[in-house]
Image: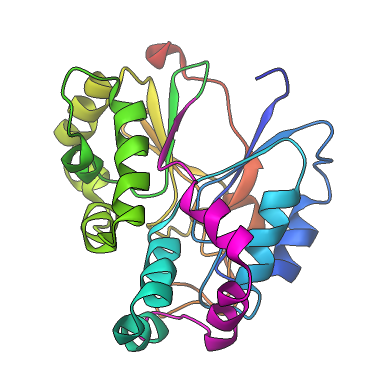
């Protein structure tokens, strides 16, 4: 990408705080990569989707909460589960009225590999590998292809299973190493598992970086109710450590 990359981790409906965090980063000067989970928790989930879609020079990934929302939209028997994990009924009503936004959301990638080899994904696990149907294909392209196939065929459950586990890479670094080899990536950049550092949390010698800095003031007991430093979730992508180059 010709512009420096700005990473945005889990927003969870806190659009007001997102606007404030993005002020130092004009969209004409940065390529913004949203790592998913814009929805649920706060009151502006669908507003966050629209904003990310319309922000110039942006890439938007699919998070497990977007998968759960699409699942609830298709199968009303899943609404209770989705509400229990922070879903806002008015957001579902808004999304139901916007077929164009639904189609755009279904087309979001699960993985993006940058020119420096950084692999962007929402969840910090290698369960995405379960989505690879053709072992001879590029794994990033294949995961993205199968993500769309599953969404188009009512198999959100398989995506949910792939994207929901927390903290796999931190607990099992050998799985991170194998995932990097399989995808040809230099490091993984993810959200999904909240941390309490004041900046994006790099671990395992920079092989992974977490951008879920407990940003939302509304989302869940795992978060610090918006007390997480904004710069731990919205921050430039740092250069690769020397040992990762």
Q: Quadrant of residue 80?
A: bottom left
Residue 35: % across, % down? 51, 47
Residue shown at the point (29%, 62%) measured from the top left: 154
**Is residue 73 shown above or below 172?**
below
Residue shown at the point (59%, 32%) measured from the top left: 237
Which sits in the foreground, 170 or 154? 154
Task: Answer with left or right where residue 200 lies relative to residue 55.
Answer: left
Residue 60: % across, % down? 57, 45
Q: Is residue 95 magenta?
A: yes
Task: Answer with left or right where residue 195 lies relative to residue 175.
Answer: right
Residue 163: % across, % down? 29, 54
Which sits in the foreground, 152 or 54? 152
The quadrant of the rendering that contains the N terminus is top right
Residue shown at the point (83%, 51%) measured from the top left: 23
**Is residue 187 shown above or below 202?**
above
Q: How many marks?
A: 0
Which sits in the foreground, 154 or 64? 154
The quadrant of the rendering that contains the C terminus is top left
Residue shown at the point (44%, 51%) measured from the top left: 191
Q: Is residue 77 magenta?
A: no
Q: Quadrant of residue 127?
A: top left
**Is residue 202 shown above or below 232?**
above
Task: Answer with left or right where residue 13 lies relative to residue 72.
Answer: right
Q: Which residues are magenta?
A: 84-113
């Amino acid at each position: 990408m010709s512009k420096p990359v700005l990473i945005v981790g889990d927003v969870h409906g806190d659009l007001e705080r997102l606007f404030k965090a993005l002020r130092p980063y004009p969209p004409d000067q940065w390529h913004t990569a949203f790592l998913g989970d814009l929805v649920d928790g706060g009151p502006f989930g669908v507003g966050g989707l629209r904003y990310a879609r319309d922000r110039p020079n942006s890439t938007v990934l699919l998070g497990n909460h977007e998968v759960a929302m699409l699942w609830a939209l298709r199968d009303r028997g899943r609404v209770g589960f989705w509400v229990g994990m922070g879903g806002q009924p008015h957001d579902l009503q808004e999304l139901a009225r916007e077929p164009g936004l639904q189609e755009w959301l279904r087309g979001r990638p699960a993985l993006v590999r940058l020119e420096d080899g950084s692999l962007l994904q929402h969840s910090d696990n290698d369960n995405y590998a379960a989505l690879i149907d053709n072992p001879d294909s590029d794994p990033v392209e294949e995961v993205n292809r199968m993500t769309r196939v599953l969404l188009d065929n009512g198999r959100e459950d398989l995506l949910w299973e792939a994207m929901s586990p927390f903290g796999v890479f931190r607990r099992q670094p050998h799985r991170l190493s194998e995932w990097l080899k399989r995808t040809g990536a230099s490091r993984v950049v993810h959200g999904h598992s909240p941390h309490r550092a004041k900046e994006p949390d790099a671990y395992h010698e920079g092989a992974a970086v977490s951008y879920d800095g407990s940003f939302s003031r509304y989302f869940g007991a795992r978060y610090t109710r918006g007390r997480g430093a904004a710069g731990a979730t919205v921050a430039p992508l740092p250069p690769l450590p020397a040992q990762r180059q």
